[in-house]
Image (cartoon, grey):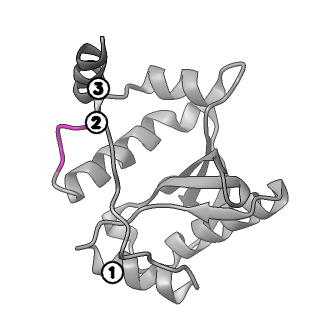
Amino acid sequence: MSTIIRKATIEDIPRVLDLIQELADYEKEPNEVELTVKDLQQDGFGSQPKFNCFVAEVNSKIEGIALVYPRYSTWKGEALHLEDLIVSESKRGLGIGGLLLDEVVKFGHSKGVKRISWEVLDWNEPAISFYEKKGAKVLRDWDVVQLNEQGIKQYITNIN
C-alpha cells in the first residue's frame, strides 16, 4: 500500500466532502452536513483561507483527511484546532490516521503553536484509544458547548 500525505488541492474537495459525509453517517448525524463543494473550495482556497486540509492518498485515491484551523488560547497563545481527522471506513486500521495526525502535529509545530486541540465523541472508544496511544490527553471533564444557527438567531432575538 502506497500512502502519500499532502496538502489538499481545490480539485480534492469533492472527495473531501464525501469523507465528511461518511463521518457524519458514522456519527449518526447523516443530515447535518450543510456545506457544499463550492463552500469548501471558497473557504479553503479563497484570498484568505479559513482552514488547511491534508489528505491521505492511498494508491492514487484520497482515503483520509485532516482539516485544521487557527485558534487562540487566552492561557497559551496561538493554538491549532483539528476539526476532523477522517479515514474511510474501508481503510481504518492501516496507519493512515496516524500519518495524518503526524502531519497535523508537524504543521502545528512549524507554526509555533502552543497547543493542538480537538474533540472526540465519548462513545468513540477506538478513536479515544488511538489518540491516547499517540500521547494526547483526553479531557473527560469538559463538555463541548455550541450554539447552532437557530440558537444564534434565537439568542439575538432574546437580547434585542
- Place residue 32 in its image quadrant: top left
The amino acid sitting under disc 3 is: Glu
Determine the residue positioned at 31% across, 54% down.
Answer: 23
- Find out whether the residues at labels 2 and 3 contact each other: C-beta distance under 8 Å: no
Query: Magenta region: which residues?
Result: 29-33
Pointer 2 local density, CA inside 10 Å: few below 14, some 14–19, many at least 20: few
Q: How many marks?
A: 3
- Place residue 136 in its image quadrant: bottom right
The amino acid sitting under disc 2 is: Val
The amino acid sitting under disc 1 is: Pro
* Residue bearing the label numbered 3: 149
Question: Rounded to the nearest whole Å, what is the CA distance between mark 2 and mark 3?
Answer: 13 Å
Q: Position of residue 76 (x, y in %)?
A: 71, 60
The furthest residue to the bottom: 133
* Residue bearing the label numbered 2: 33
30 within the magenta span: yes
Q: Quadrant of the N terminus?
A: bottom right
- Place residue 36 in its image quadrant: top left
Q: Is residue 73 above or below residue 58?
A: above
Determine the residue positioned at 49% across, 29% down.
Answer: 40
**Which mark lies nearer to you, 2 or 3?**
3
Q: Identify the element where label 1 is drawn.
A: helix
Pointer 3 local density, CA inside 10 Å: few below 14, some 14–19, many at least 20: few
40 and 128: which is toward the camera: 128
- Prevailing SS of the magenta stretch: loop
- Numbered label attached to residue 126: 1
Q: Position of residue 128 (x, y in %)?
A: 38, 79
